[in-house]
Image: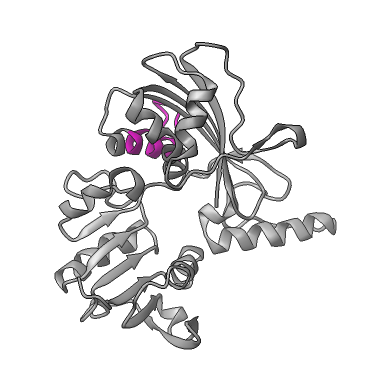
Amino acid sequence: MKSEPVIAIAGVTGAVGAEFIATLNKRGFPVRKLKALASRRSAGRTVEFRGGRIEIEELTERSFDGVDIALFSAGSAVSRRFSPVAVQAGAVVIDNSSAFRMEENVPLVIPEINGRRIREHKGIIAVPNCSAITALMPLWPIHQRNRVRRVILSTYQAASGAGAAAMQELVESTRASLAGEAFEPRVFPHPYAFNVFNHDTRIDLETGYNEEETKVIRETRKIFEDDRIAVGVTCVRVPVLRAHSQSITFACERPIDEEEVRAILASAPGVKVIDDRARNISRCRSRPRARTKSWSAVSAGT
C-alpha cells in the first residue's frame, strides 16, 4: 500500500460517508487524493475535505481507476455491484454493508479483536454490524481469559444506524408530533417520534429473529471463531439521533466476578469503563452475585 493512497468513498453523502471523512481528518490519515462518489442525483455537489471542496462524482464502473482504497457505505446492492469492479481496478475495498460479511473468503474484522485477518483479504474487507462491534469489543478481552459460552444481548438502536434519511425523519416527525401535526413515515414502517419498535428489518418466521438479530448471532461466531457460543439477541429502534446502547448479560465457562471483569476491561483497547454509581452515571453497570458465572453490563457507542 502506498504511503499516500488515493481513497474513494462510495456513498459519501450518507451519514457514514460523512463519518468516513471526519475519521480521515481526525486521525490525520495520509491521502494523496480523495474521490467523492455517490448516485447521479448527488453528482456535481461538493463535500468539504481538509479546507477544500471536492466535487461529487457519479458512481460508475470507471470510478475506481487509480484508486488504492475504496470505502463503501452505500448499501448492500451497491456494494455487490461495484466492489468487484473496484477490486479488479486494483483497489482494496473496505465495505460497511452486510453484502460480504458471511462469505468464507472475506475477513470480517474488528481491528482490536482479529486485525490479523486483514492480511488474508482477497480484495474485500468487511466491517461488522454496528451492534456486533459494540457488544464484542468488551466481550473479547473477557473471552480470551475465560471463554464466553452464552450471551444475551438487548440493543437500543438510534436513528443513525439507518442513515441520514432516518435521522431526518426522526427530527421531522418529532417536530410534527410536538406541533400536533400529522406525519406520514417514509423511512420506517412505524411512526418514530416518541416511539419504540422492533428493529426495521424482516423477521424470519421460523426463528422469530429479525435480520439485525440474525446478523449479530452469525457475526459473533465468525469473529470469535467459535460456533459453540449461544447467542440470544433482541434489537429495537429507539427515538434518539445517535449512540446505540446495549444491555449485555454473558456467562463464562468458569466463575467470574465483577472485580475481575472490571480489571480486564480497564486495560482493554477501545473500551472505557464509566461507573459513577453515586451520581447514577454509568456505561458499565453490574449487579453480579459472588462467584457466579454471569456478569451484566451496559455498553454504549456512537
Count up the numbered dots: 0
State whether residue 156 appears in this view.
Answer: no
Q: Is residue 208 magenta?
A: yes
- Above or below: residue 170 compared with residue 237: below
Q: Nearer the viewer, residue 216 or 111?
A: 111
Q: Is residue 52 left or right of residue 33?
A: right
| Residue drawn at 48 percent across, 72 percent down | 13
**Most distant residue in the right direction:** 179
- Quadrant of the rendered structure where residue 145 is? top left
- Left or right: where 124 falls relative to 190: left
Please check the rendered image and state whether residue 130 is part of the magenta-colored stretch, yes or no.
no
| Residue 21 x, y percent position in the rendering | 45, 72
Q: Give the quarter of the figure containing the N terminus.
A: bottom left
Name the side, left or right, on which 121 lies relative to 13: left
Q: What span is colored magenta in the figure? A: 202-220
Q: Judge left or right: residue 61 versus residue 196.
A: left
Identify the image's colour scheme: rainbow, by chain, secondary structure or one colour: one colour
Q: Position of residue 156 (x, y in %)?
A: 59, 40
Residue at image position (45%, 47%) is: 270
Q: Position of residue 223 (x, y in %)?
A: 30, 39
Judge by depth and name the residue closer to the eye, 97 or 198: 97
Which is nearer the eye, 181 or 229?
Answer: 229
Which residue sits at x=39%, y=59%?
A: 75
Percent across and percent down for residue 300 are 57, 43
